[in-house]
Each structure stands twice: as structure tokens, then as C-alpha cells.
Image: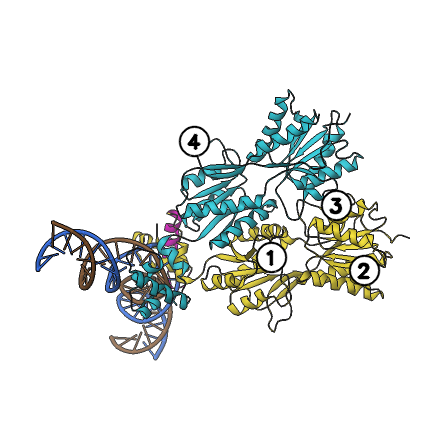
Chain colours: A cyan, B yellow, C blue, D brown
Amino acid sequence: MNLKQLAHMLALSQTTVSRALNGYPEVNEETRRRVMDAAKRHGYRPNPSARRLATGKTGMIGYVLPTGASVDIDPHFVEFLSGLGDYARSHELDLVLSPADADDQETTYRRIVANRQVDAVYISSPRPADRRVALVNTLGIPFIVHGRSEGFDFDYAFTDIDNEGAFHEAARLLIQLGHRRLALINGDDRETFAIHRERGVRRALAASGLSLSERHVCSVDMTEENGYRATRRLLEEGDAPTAIACSSLIMALGVVRAVRDLGLSIPGDVSLIAHDDVFPWLRPENFSVPLSTTRSSIRLAGARVAERLAARISGLEEGARGEVWPVDLVVRGSVAGAPG
Amino acid sequence: MNLKQLAHMLALSQTTVSRALNGYPEVNEETRRRVMDAAKRHGYRPNPSARRLATGKTGMIGYVLPTGASVDIDPHFVEFLSGLGDYARSHELDLVLSPADADDQETTYRRIVANRQVDAVYISSPRPADRRVALVNTLGIPFIVHGRSEGFDFDYAFTDIDNEGAFHEAARLLIQLGHRRLALINGDDRETFAIHRERGVRRALAASGLSLSERHVCSVDMTEENGYRATRRLLEEGDAPTAIACSSLIMALGVVRAVRDLGLSIPGDVSLIAHDDVFPWLRPENFSVPLSTTRSSIRLAGARVAERLAARISGLEEGARGEVWPVDLVVRGSVAGAPG
DNA sequence: CGAAAAAGCCAAAGCGCTTTGGAAGACTCT
DNA sequence: AGAGTCTTCCAAAGCGCTTTGGCTTTTTCG
């Protein structure tokens, strides 16, 4: 059942039927009702391929997926996707993942924009002065950044959490508990979120006349193993920290294992706070010692990004508004006063 | 730059240019070269929207993503996606995720097929007599099942691993080590993979005249917490098992924590073997006691599924061939002879 | 009441590609 | 040389929708 048939069946022109269906004003209300009815009754659905050829609109949002034999997709991605998908579903939006060589994403961005394959895109895990953001901005396709980039001569729309504030609060708590030597086990510090977290910790320390030793901050891919290694190194050196802030729950698994392997205890010898993106399959309250966390649901962020993308596509949202979500500090058993 | 302009520029018809570009035989080789040259030089790329309207081909593969507030996307998904994306990239295939109400995926499948939104789809985590498989089969779109369904009156194409064989081998090893009471902490046993794994364990036990007590098998969502709970329950009851087979590394985290909480040790009191899908961020050799595993890279499976989908789209693969990959049994420190 | 404005509808021209059904010229064969 | 066969190209008809421009008919209003 296509438009032509439907129009013929109603003894109307395609024009009128099309307009009736798409809510244009120049059609009699009664006619519109007749058309709507018939469309529903016959299960008419406009062919999206035809529509997109005519309008350029696709009803899809895009994401360029960096791939490669040595490129790992972050497990956070799936949780973000849950939220995004949950919202997108209610708006009949599909998500198209365009795999790209991790070292050359530009080609793919250009392709999906030139081909009008999607109505909008989002960008995640941005770095300062991220080239993707600059590119997409000049290409002129609607977009939202999940996270923040910095150092452009233009503004853009983003949804981010207050990473700096979160880690500032976490560090402040530890300092209040008497800790003087903090360590930070961070994610990839070429990414903005990691930079902001480090900044938060440093600011809290500075406020108390303390500082973050270079040896006490490390930046690694957020795997269990790297959490373990970093912790071993930190705790086996002289001048070991008495408290650790950690950028992910997965790394925290490694931290806990390392502490235990060294015959130390949490929070007796070391206090620990980790960032929790809220995975259903790994929860801080279920660690052997319940973990204190800075908590922010990445799933909600996914839903919000989808919502904003949808708003931008339909013209309801404009401008370069950035939004920053506060982060909860949830105190559990893994923090205590500094030893000694 | 569109076809019309290019044709005009070459003083040829659109027909000829189109055919030259698409490798049809009825065009002079020299003409073809001229066309190819000009196309390359002017960076001509056929408009995909137009092409798909004309041909119905989209260059995309589809996946219906079950969503909902209480629906969690499995973290395995992201690793599968890595492999899929890695292959798809090399073939300029995009992946479109169509979010669907988890309780009504049929509508979405029908939509994407009726609208010709994708050239092929894949289905994951199938159950016996999975309705999605039956549906997609009748809808007539090319598809591959990742995993296996059962109980149809038709054959279909799938790529699966030998779950039964893997858990059979694992159980056999434990039995050889003198264990008599095995437990299985399984995933959702409405899914085929879980059924097969249980079958494997039972078969191994039966071969030695043993059996799997109903109290020693449980089926849960594969979270850390559920692994912990199941293990507590198993070990605190009388007649506790001396060996556990576990369907995921994430649950194994909980198993290890529970064993420790109970003051027991691995492998002294309990032997443990888990299935490892090979995540980059959580590796069995890094468990406090290195974990024995049945190992199969879900990432490779993703790449293989993409490869087969591509082959089906281009007509290189036909028929209902199913393939079953063997699974490695990797023995590490978490297994030992039965206590006593 | 008659002119101007508004409402309601339609035919046809795109959107940019593929594919059908020829047609013209080159080539073979008797 | 004429009939038949290839080879090589083209005009035009889709694919199914939106949108432009225009044409009637109805309504408004001095």
C-alpha cells in the first residue's frame, strides 16, 4: 500500500493525502480525518526510502564507532546505549553505528554527512580540542557531545557530568578524614573527563595546602588488571598513599585485589573511593568492603542525549547550550580515618 | 556532483555511466575506464538514498535492540559489537540498532523488513523455538543467528559455540579430580546456551554414574551479585558442592567473594571453572586465584557473523548452514582435587 | 452585489538512482 | 551484398514520496 493507491482509493490527489498525513494546514479538517482513517485502516506507512530521498530526513541518529583489532569498545558504551535506546524507541528513532578506523574517523563522519545518512550524531569520550567536534561543527549536522571538549572558538551543545566537582568532593572527604597522601588512578588522561577529575582532586588538596605527587597519579585504560598494577606500584613504593580515588568500578576490582594481595585492608590501611557509572552487573555496595562512590548513571545520560538529539532534529532545541549534571557522593564502608 | 552532471560532463547517458560504475558488461572497456576516472577525479559518490529507493539495497545490517526501563543490555554485547564493527568497516557496512519494547519485538522486526531498512539482520541470545527466528524466517530477510534455537520445522543459518561440549569437558575434568558434588551457576535457562551448558554438565556426571542435584543448579541473570548469592546458598546448605561451574566471569567475581566471605578457599575447599567470553577489561588469569575457564572469544564471533551477513547479502552464501565452534578449556589455579 | 481574499484541492515536477526496451552501428556469415 | 548477430549506447520509465505553482470554489467585506 503506497501513497498513490491510497490517494486513488480516496479519490484524492497524492498531494492532498500527503499533506493531510503530515499535518499541513491547507487541507479541510474533515478530509484530513477521512485520510487519517483510511491510512490507519489499511496500515499505510510511508516508505522511508522514498521520504528520505524527497526530504533528506532519515529518522536516524548516528554514531561513529571506532574499531580496529586493538581497539576495545568501552563497556560503559552498552549502558549508555540502554538509555539512548530506551528513549529513541519511544520516538521511532533508530541508531546507526558506522564503524570507522579508529585512526581515521574523519572520513566516516564526512561520508555519513555527505550521504545524509543520519539526521544528527553524538560524540562520546571527547578530548580537549577534539577534532571530531570541530569537524562535525563545520559539517553543520546537528550534534550533541556526551562529555566535554575544550579550547574551541565556538560553543556547542553537550551533556556532561561534573567530574571535577565529584572528585573534588571525594578528595575533600578523604582530606577531612585526615588523609594527607592521596592517589588518583585515572582513566586515559587525554580525555577531558580524566583531566577534570584530576583537577578536582588537585583543587581539594591545594585548598588544604597539600598537593598530588606526580608519582601518585596514573592514567591507564580502565581494566581490572591496570587497577591492580597501579595499586601495587603505589603501595609498594615508599611514601605510599593512604587513600585512593579511582575512576572506575572495574579498576576498583583490581585495587581491592591488590590491597588484599599485599596483606593490607580497606579501609584500615587504605581508603578507597571510585566513580560508579551504575552498571546493573557490578554494584559498589556488593564489594567485599562496600565501596564509597561518586555516582552518576550513564544510562540516564544516554536517554538525555537521545532526547536532546530528537529535540534538535525537530528544531525544538537550538543554540549551544551545555549542561552539567551534579554527581552524588555516596559514602560506604571503604573510607575511614587515615591510619596512624 | 550527481549522476546527471557526471553523465553530461562525459557526454554520455546516465544509463551508461551507471552501468560503467556498477560493472555491467554492456559497456566498452575504454568507456568504462573514462567513466571510472572521471568519477574518481570528481569524487562522485552515488547518493545512497536514491540508490536504495531504486534498488532496495541499503548497505546496512540490522539488530533489534530490546529496551525498557528494567531491561539491561548484556555487557557481552559490546564485545560482540567490536568484532562485528571491525569486519563491517572493511565492507562499508553500517549497523542499525532499532530499539524495541523488549516485550514486543515483532512489531519492530516487521517494520524494518517492510520498510526495507536493512539488507539483513542478526539475532542474538536465542531461546528454543525463538519467535524472532521463526518470524524473521517467514519475513524472508537474510539473517544469521548468533547462538542456536531449536525445535523448528525449518533449518536456518547460525554461528554458535559448543556450549555443551565446553561444559562437558569442564565437568569431566572436575570429576576426574575426584569431585562428586558439582554445582552449576548458570545464566538464564530460558536461553539455549544455558540449556546446552547444563546438558553438558549432566552428561559428564551421568557418564560417571553421578548426577546434578536440583539444588545444585541455578539460573540467574549474570551479575556479580547473583554469583555471590548463589554461591552463599550453595555452600551454606548441607551437602555443599566441592566444585562449581559458572557461566560467566562476572558472576565468578561474586563466587570468589562469597567463598572468601565464608572463610573458604579456592581451590582448597571449592574448585571453580567459569566460562570466559574474553573481555579486555576482565581476565581470568588476573583473579586472585587464576581462574580455569572455558574460553571462546565473543569478539571473533561478532566478526564471523558480520562476515556471513555480508556474504548472504551479496549472494555468496546460501542455505541454512549452521556452524559450531569448539571451545578451549584453559586450566589454571582454581581447580584442584576434591577435598577430603 | 461584486471584487478581493482565503480555503481546498490538484497536476506535475522534482529527489538521484537503476533498469527496461530499444536503436544504431559494427561485425559475422553465406 | 543482404540477413542475422553482437556490441555499445540511449531515452524514458520507474522507485514512492514531498513540494511548487496554479486552479476552483467558497468566504469575506465594503
State how far apart marks 2 and 1 are (Cα).
29 Å
The reply to the same-chain question for discs 3 and 2 is yes
Of A110 and A313, nearer the camera is A313
Hey, what amino acid is under mark 1?
Arg
Q: Which residue is mark 1?
A: B304
Q: Could you tell which of marks 1 and 3 lies nearer the N-terminus?
A: 3
Q: What secondary structure is the stretch in magenta mostly built from?
A: helix
State how far apart marks 3 and 4 are (Cα).
48 Å
Hey, what amino acid is under mark 3?
Glu
Q: Tell me which segment is drawn in magenta.
A: B23-41
State how far apart marks 1 and 4 are (Cα).
44 Å
Q: Which residue is mark 2?
A: B172
Q: Secondary structure at mark 4?
A: loop
Q: Secondary structure at mark 1?
A: helix
- Answer above or below: position of A237 versus C9: above
- Answer above or below: position of B242 versus B202: above
Q: Are marks 3 and 4 in contact (CB under 8 Å)?
A: no
Q: Which residue is mark 3?
A: B285
Question: Is B259 one of the magenta-colored residues?
Answer: no
Q: Secondary structure at mark 2?
A: helix
Q: Secondary structure at mark 3?
A: helix
Are there few (<14), some (14-19), or many (20+) residues within 10 Å of tag 3?
A: some
